[in-house]
Structures are given as C-alpha cells and as structure tokens.
Amino acid sequence: MSVPPPSVSDMTRHWINTVSLEHVRRGVEGGFTQAEHGRDTRLRALRPGDRIAFYSPRTALRSGDPLQQFTALGTVTGAEPYQVEVTSDFRPWRLEIAFEDVSPAPIRPLLEELAFITDPKRWGFPFRRGLFEIDASDMDVVADAMRAS
C-alpha cells in the first residue's frame, strides 16, 4: 500500500517572531520580516506558504512600554532572505511576508490555550528565542484571536 504525498497544507509550518511593535509596523509597511537583529540564520528555515504571527513584548526595542500582544499575522511569500543596507554598518536580512488585516490580541487571555506555553508562571520564556516554530493548533488560536478583535 502506497502512502500519498503530503499536501501543501501538511507541509505548512507555523512560526512566531518576537519583535517590538515599532519594528513590526516597519515590516508590515514594507512587506517583510527580520529576525535575530538582522541575521539570516533562522529566516532560512521559513518557506513560502508558512504562517507567521508576531508577538510584541514592548512598543519599542529597549525603551518601549510593555505591550504583550500579538501584533501582526502573515504568510511567507519570499523564497529566500535578501539583504538590505539600512546604514553603512547595518545590513539586515529580510524575508517577504504578505500581511493580513488583523487587530492586536493580548496574550494573557490565550495562555491556557497555547500548547507551547508549558509553564504558566514563566509564560514569557519561549519568546526569548525570537523566531520559533509552533504547531498549527497554536497558530489557529492566535489567528482566531487576532481576527476576532
């Protein structure tokens, strides 16, 4: 008995990128994401069709106010990361994203529903990884919350 090849939806991966709101807004305006302070390492794992949610712990990188919200949602459209020159000493890697029109969703009401949150007392720990993979059911929880707001 032969096994059918996986469908496209079976191959779709799901990601969260931890990014300040200020940087998320730049990405939405430009149709891209960055990760790991502009390095391309983890971006290379993403493929066209993958879904990505953005979690913003703060409004700005270092001095921003606490936010703790999912702030953007999209689908990877770029096949490979590309490098841009922002300044002479900062040339980050980016990946093209098609963003959805959604509303921010606070994380706290979702904590009990997210499988990647294994310790509710230390729920912020997974986000320290920056860009990380989650399962489809967790992505659905986040996406539904953002679309319902």
Image (tube, rainbow, N blue to C red):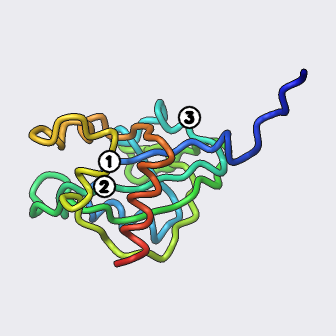
Q: Which of 70 and 98 is in front in this view?
A: 70
Tag 2 residue: 55
Does dot 1 land on a helix, a strand or a loop? loop
First reached walking from the N terminus: tag 2 or tag 1: 2
Q: Residues within 10 Å of mark 1 (few under 14, many from 20)?
A: some
Q: Residue placed at 42% from the left, 36% from the top?
A: 39
Q: Point out the image quarter for the C terminus.
A: bottom left
Pick whichever of labels 1 and 3 is earlier in the sequence. 3
Q: Against 7, is 105 above or below?
A: below
Q: How far apart are marks 2 and 3 (CA)?
A: 20 Å
Side of 108 relative to 3 (left or right): left
- What percent of the width, then of the height, locates residue 92? 43, 44
Q: Which residue was labeled with disc 3?
A: 44
Q: Which of 48 and 27 is in front in this view?
A: 48
Q: In which quarter of the image is residue 36?
A: top left
Residue at 43% across / 40% down in the picture? 134
The residue that label 1 is drawn on is 114
